[in-house]
Amino acid sequence: MSDITKALSGVAVIAVIMLAPSISERLNEEAASYVNDSESAHDGLPETWVNSQALCVLFPPEAAHPKFSSGVTMIQFDGSTVGVNMDYNGTGACVGGFSGFESGKDLMDSAVNASSPDLSYNSTEFSFGLQIDSIGGIEPCDAYSCTDSSGAYWSLYHNGGHSMVGISDMILSEGDVVLWKIETW
């Protein structure tokens, strides 16, 4: 190897070492880019999920899930963690990057599988459909005091609005976002 080649190789190695932190920082910034559009159902989700389907579960601070108690963890459909959005309103997890699901229940089951089943749910089957009793081991009355005159339940949202149907009757399109959170009555 000539002296010039050795010198150029040394300069290249030094350049890579000096640039590595900024390259790593830039990659982390790209990976942690979230949609910032309050009019979009994808608000707060990774930008890479904009045309994909996602399912989110928000836990109240009073009953935060031990694994998802700081911000909202973003989980790719293959189970890999994309990042944690500390600015998302609440604590919990979103599983996204899905496509092709036509049924809300099928999307939910796939999201549970991708979360290694940290978002597993218990439900009761009624003639009108499923009632979700717990998600991630959290029951609504664990988070809020339930009495004879007040209660709490897992509320279902579809693309930012209250769903007019249950998860087993929900018909999905590409880019849809399903969200569960506990509400009181």
Image (spheres, grey):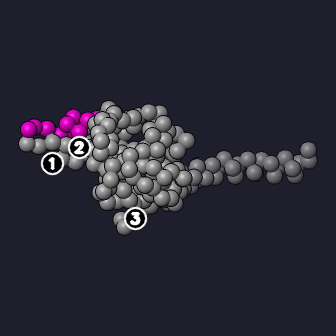
**Seen from this angle, which residue lies furthest front?**
127
Q: Earlier in the sequence, mark 1 or mark 2?
A: 2
Tell me the SS state at disc 1. loop
Q: Nearer the viewer, mark 3 or mark 2?
A: 2
Q: Amino acid at mark 2?
A: Tyr
Tell me the SS state at disc 2. strand
The percent coordinates of residue 50 (x first, y second) are: 49, 60
The image shows residue 171, relative to residue 115, as above or below, that is below
- Front in this rendered view, residue 24 or 143: 143
Q: Amino acid at mark 1?
A: Trp
The percent coordinates of residue 180 (x first, y second) are: 33, 47
Q: Is residue 158 visible?
A: yes
- Front in this rendered view, residue 46 or 132: 132
- Label disc, if present, on residue 53 of the rendered structure: none
Q: Earlier in the sequence, mark 3 or mark 2?
A: 3
Q: Is residue 111 visible?
A: no
Q: Amino acid at mark 3?
A: Ser
Q: Residue at x 91, y 47 (%)?
A: 2
- Magenta part of the protein: which range? 138-148
On the image, which quarter does residue 140 sit in?
top left
Tell me the SS state at disc 3. loop
Q: Rate crowding at label 1 as few (under 14), some (14 to 19) or many (20 or more) other CA atoms within 10 Å.
A: few
Residue holding disc 3: 40
